[in-house]
Image (spheres, rainbow, N blue to C red):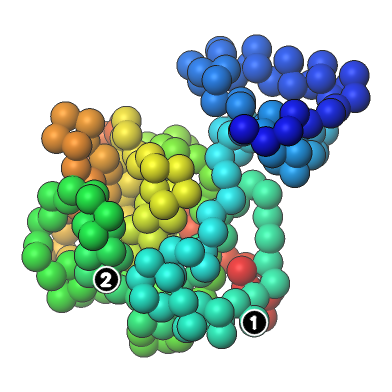
Amino acid sequence: MANPVVVNFDQTKTLIAFAERAQKHDLAVSDLQVFIDKPDTMVRLVGYIKAGAPDWQVLVLPDINWAYVYQKLGMEAEYQEFAKTVNWNDPNLWIVPVVNGATCNKVVAAMKNDGVKFWLYAKDLDASLSRNDRDPNKDGSYVIGFRRTIEADEENKNLSAEMLAEQKHRGGTLLERLLLGAGYFWTTGQHLDVKNVTLSAGSCNLDSNVPSVFFSSDSGKVCVDGYSPGNRDGSLRSRSAVPPPVAEQLA
């Protein structure tokens, strides 16, 4: 364990208040250990709360080491070159770098090498897709932001892909969701979407279904499935994709 972090009285009161809020949301207070062990995280915690902390989950979810993720994918050099062009940070978002050469199949294979089990609707996920709203292998590397939450965005529940399209919703692609899930796993050893399902509304399969991703605690597998574009329910939710504030500023 790292040396204890020294905080002033106001910061201590803030941390206690946050712990009380966390318990109301069924978050174990033990999860706050990261704030004790990492002084820089404590500073961010205090900053979030002073800023109003609109989403309490932001406070407990760590940054993702994307250099390590792309090392796992065998693309460290490609990532490092792309990272030189990136200049976008937002404490409320995970900024996902989607580098030319990254594929769904490559992400799944790398996670399998680390012992992660999968259930896949198709052996070749990349070949199964007919549309991606963003594609690094056609349009070049880019970055996209997603809210820092374990579960997909609650405001998008009960909205089918068809309904989201009518609203001109910008949803995540299957590759973006797999990269985000891989990054979270290699950072925390845990998985996203353990209670609900991310609908990857930014992609479409050859059979017109919309791919989805979730972790099944019953099977212990990351499940990549497909849903009819008209399918809707409370557990099926798209993650809203947030573009960079300026086209030239990536992260």
Task: Say left or right for 45 vs 116.
Answer: right
Q: Residues within 10 Å of mark 1 (few under 14, many from 20)?
A: few
The answer for how far apart the CA atoms under marks 1 and 2 are is: 24 Å
Residue 250, position as x, y percentages in the image: 62, 73
Name the foreground residue: 37 vs 106: 37
Count of marks, rendered view: 2
Task: Judge whether residue 161 can be spotted in this image.
Answer: no
Quadrant of the snapshot with the N terminus: top right
Residue 202, position as x, y percentages in the image: 35, 63
Say which element carries label 1. loop
- Label located before the other in sequence (1 or 2): 1
Kind of residue indicated by mark 2? Lys
Residue 175, position as x, y percentages in the image: 33, 65
Name the foreground residue: 150 vs 185: 185
Residue 162, position as x, y percentages in the image: 29, 54
Kind of residue indicated by mark 1? Thr
Image position of 185 with respect to 245: above or below: above
Residue placed at 28% from the left, 64% from the top? 110
Task: Say left or right for 143 vs 72.
Answer: right
Residue placed at 69% from the left, 29% from the top? 36
Residue placed at 82% from the left, 16% from the top? 13
Task: Say left or right for 101 vs 127.
Answer: right
- Residue beneath disc 2: 106
Quadrant of the snapshot with the C terminus: bottom right
Q: Residues within 10 Å of mark 2 (few under 14, many from 20)?
A: some
- Residue beneath disc 1: 85
